[in-house]
Image: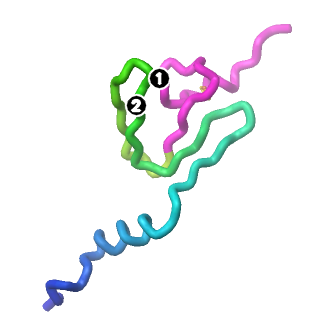
Protein backbone atom coordinates (compact mmCIF):
# COMPACT_ATOMS: atom_id res chain seq x y z
CA UNK A 1 0.00 0.00 0.00
CA UNK A 2 1.24 3.47 -0.88
CA UNK A 3 2.08 5.89 1.90
CA UNK A 4 -0.40 8.78 1.80
CA UNK A 5 2.47 11.28 2.04
CA UNK A 6 4.41 9.71 -0.83
CA UNK A 7 3.99 11.71 -4.03
CA UNK A 8 1.99 10.09 -6.81
CA UNK A 9 3.92 9.55 -10.07
CA UNK A 10 2.20 12.56 -11.69
CA UNK A 11 3.09 14.75 -8.70
CA UNK A 12 6.71 13.71 -9.06
CA UNK A 13 6.71 14.70 -12.76
CA UNK A 14 5.20 18.08 -11.87
CA UNK A 15 7.86 18.58 -9.20
CA UNK A 16 10.65 17.79 -11.67
CA UNK A 17 9.23 20.28 -14.17
CA UNK A 18 8.92 22.93 -11.46
CA UNK A 19 12.57 22.52 -10.42
CA UNK A 20 13.98 23.91 -13.64
CA UNK A 21 13.11 26.96 -15.71
CA UNK A 22 10.78 26.51 -18.67
CA UNK A 23 12.81 26.42 -21.86
CA UNK A 24 12.09 28.92 -24.65
CA UNK A 25 14.09 28.51 -27.86
CA UNK A 26 14.40 31.32 -30.39
CA UNK A 27 14.94 30.12 -33.96
CA UNK A 28 16.40 32.13 -36.81
CA UNK A 29 13.62 33.38 -39.14
CA UNK A 30 11.14 31.00 -37.54
CA UNK A 31 8.96 30.44 -34.52
CA UNK A 32 9.77 30.66 -30.84
CA UNK A 33 9.59 27.16 -29.36
CA UNK A 34 8.12 27.00 -25.86
CA UNK A 35 7.83 23.93 -23.67
CA UNK A 36 4.11 23.29 -23.23
CA UNK A 37 1.50 23.38 -22.05
CA UNK A 38 1.10 27.11 -22.60
CA UNK A 39 -1.51 29.80 -22.25
CA UNK A 40 -1.03 32.75 -24.62
CA UNK A 41 -2.71 36.10 -24.12
CA UNK A 42 -3.20 37.81 -27.49
CA UNK A 43 -3.06 41.53 -28.19
CA UNK A 44 -6.88 41.69 -28.22
CA UNK A 45 -7.01 40.22 -24.73
CA UNK A 46 -8.24 36.76 -25.71
CA UNK A 47 -6.46 33.72 -24.36
CA UNK A 48 -5.58 30.56 -26.27
CA UNK A 49 -4.04 27.41 -24.84
CA UNK A 50 -2.06 24.45 -26.11
CA UNK A 51 -1.28 21.21 -24.31
CA UNK A 52 1.46 20.21 -26.74
CA UNK A 53 4.83 19.10 -25.41
CA UNK A 54 6.50 21.86 -27.44
CA UNK A 55 4.58 24.81 -28.85
CA UNK A 56 5.76 26.86 -31.85
CA UNK A 57 4.74 30.50 -31.55
CA UNK A 58 4.69 32.45 -34.82
CA UNK A 59 6.97 35.48 -34.95
CA UNK A 60 6.58 36.30 -38.67
CA UNK A 61 2.82 37.11 -38.50
CA UNK A 62 2.20 35.12 -41.71
CA UNK A 63 0.61 32.11 -39.98
CA UNK A 64 -3.04 31.45 -40.72
CA UNK A 65 -3.29 29.90 -37.27
CA UNK A 66 -1.62 32.76 -35.40
CA UNK A 67 -0.28 32.69 -32.69
CA UNK A 68 0.73 29.15 -33.63
CA UNK A 69 3.32 28.64 -36.35
CA UNK A 70 1.95 26.86 -39.44
CA UNK A 71 5.34 26.94 -41.24
CA UNK A 72 4.26 29.85 -43.47
CA UNK A 73 7.56 31.50 -42.53
CA UNK A 74 9.25 29.02 -44.90
CA UNK A 75 7.58 30.44 -48.01
CA UNK A 76 9.91 32.38 -50.21
CA UNK A 77 8.93 35.42 -52.24
CA UNK A 78 9.80 35.82 -55.92
CA UNK A 79 12.65 38.15 -56.62
S1 LIG B 1 7.01 31.75 -37.60
FE1 LIG B 1 6.23 30.05 -38.62
S2 LIG B 1 4.50 30.81 -39.63
FE2 LIG B 1 5.28 32.50 -38.59
Q: CA distance from mark 1 to mark 2?
A: 15 Å
Q: Give the dominant element type of the magenta stretch: helix, strand or loop.
A: loop
Classify 69 as above or below 64.
Answer: below
Q: Assess mark 1: CB under 8 A from ligand 1?
A: no
Residue sitting at the far top: 79
Q: Residue at x 54, y 38 (%)?
A: 56
Instruction: Please identify, in this view, whether the residue under mark 1 or under mark 2 is nearer the observer.
Output: 2
Query: Which residue is located at x 29 percent, y 75 percent?
Result: 9
Instruction: Name the side, left or right, on which 9 lies relative to 54.
Output: left
Task: Establish if 29 lies above or below 20.
Answer: above
Residue 59 on image: x %, y %: 61, 28
Image quadrant of residue 69? top right
Q: Nearer the viewer, residue 24 or 72?
A: 24
Q: Classify residue 15 as left or right of residue 34.
A: left
Q: Quadrant of the C terminus?
A: top right
| Label 2 element class | strand
- Residue extending furthest toward the right: 79
- Asked whether 68 falls inside the magenta stretch, the response is yes
Q: Measuring from the top left, give residue 55's x and y in whole percent.
A: 49, 42
Q: Residue at x 63, y 23 (%)?
A: 60
Q: Residues within 10 Å of mark 1 (few under 14, many from 20)?
A: few
Residue 13 percent coordinates (x, y): 37, 70
**Which comes before the other along the chain, label 1 or label 2?**
2
Q: Which residue is mark 2?
A: 41
State the residue at coordinates (25%, 76%). Answer: 8
CB of mark 1 within 8 Å of CB of mark 2? no
**SS state under label 1:** loop
Residue 67 x %, y %: 48, 27
Which region of the structure is painted magenta? 55-79
Against 12, residue 1 (above or below) is below
Label placed on residue 65: 1
Quadrant containing ligand 1 reads top right
Amino acid sequence: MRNANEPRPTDRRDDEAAERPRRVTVTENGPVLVEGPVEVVLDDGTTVTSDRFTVALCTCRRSRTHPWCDTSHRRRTKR
